Image (spheres, rainbow, N blue to C red):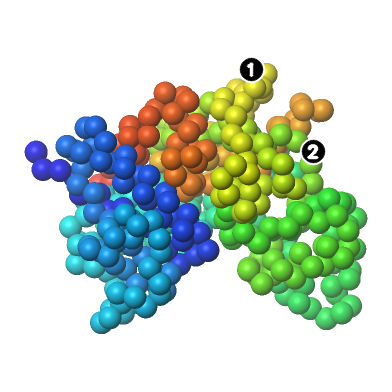
Amino acid sequence: MAKLRVGLLFGGCSGEHEVSISSARAIARAFATGSNQETYDLVPIYIQKDGCWQDEPIARQVLEAGTALPPGDGAAGKSLWQLPQTAATIDVWFPILHGPNGEDGTVQGLLQLMQTPFVGSGVLGSAIGMDKLAMKTAFAQAGLAQVKYRAVSRAQIWSNPCVYPRLCDELEAALGYPCFVKPANLGSSVGISKVRNRAQLEAALDSAASYDRRLIVEAGVVAREVECAVLGNDQPRASVIGEITYDSDFYDYETKYTEGRAGLAIPAVLPEAIAKQIQEMALQAFAAVDAAGLARVDFFYVESTGEVLINEINTLPGFTATSMYPQLWAATGVAFPDLVDQLVQFALERRPQSGNA
């Protein structure tokens, strides 16, 4: 029986390019383990930061070295987004592109046009999962409790001197301090600021507006940060619960990706009823955004009141050996090599059927 050719798509045009390479390296090792070696033929395809696609030998060199290829290198004679010839030979895609142009529905739309199955959510689920404002609207419609927030546009922030002070007044009155200012469409905590006063609020809004034209400002909450992994399609499963601990002011990019800055407690020590509630809410969130394949859902557990508040869903979470998503499934009884195998099978399960829309 011929091996299934899996296109491992990594890199991408976002600030999370290096994280994608780390995730791809871990996934490649999993495909080279046990029975996966006999079942799958892994074909790495690398997207440079400037958008050029690279296959062998450059893609494998990047995968083995673990470092990004400088923009322009290896691009002689190639136009932007020109697909390598090997793309036509792929049986199923495994995109592990984090951030904009990778997990926001854009690449998913391209893969869908190729009529080739791929791991993870489709265009709709990916787009909603990437845009924090659209996501929160979907959560509210599903009746999921969440922290207070306000939507803000870049136009409001970069408006005339009369409008901007009123905006800050409204945010202070509605949310108080501390609060968090976030770009709506970035991942890995890029561009997020925790603010405690008016001066910090104004600086954070201006900074976030440089990343995105849509922003979200959330009320701060004293809570434990817990996460649940979801696996499957129409009948997904929820993993055990994990908790993130850290000594920094909040779980920012540096804390996430600097070794030793954050700790993971798996499984989290929680009342059984709370753990079950988090798992149920994770599955509800998965359905609310029309996710598929995989997702990690993040929550706040307010011990003082017993409340569980949903924070966000990540439809293409970090997939390094030390990332929360694969560790949650390992603790639930699904080893990393089995996890990537199941994800490919879930992708094939969603393969468009001939004659169907």
Q: Residue at x 53, y 47 (%)?
A: 314
Instruction: Determine the image quadrant of residue 347.
Output: top left
Task: Please provide percent x and percent y for residue 2.
Answer: 10, 43
Task: Please provide percent x and percent y for residue 141.
Answer: 64, 44
Q: Residue at x 57, y 55 (%)?
A: 187
Q: Residue furthest left?
A: 1
- Numbered circle sitting on residue 222: 2
- The front one of 141 and 236 is 236
Q: Residue at x 87, y 79 (%)?
A: 161
Task: Please provide percent x and percent y for residue 129.
Answer: 54, 51
Q: Residue at x 38, y 44 (%)?
A: 26
- Check disc 1 and report its element: helix, strand or loop: helix
**Residue type, mark 1 in image:** Glu
- The front one of 226 and 162 is 226
Please name the residue that numbered disc 1 is placed on: 272
Q: Is residue 331 visible?
A: yes
**Residue type, mark 2 in image:** Val
- Horizontal side, residue 132 vs residue 102: left or right: right
- Quarter of the image where the N terminus is located: top left
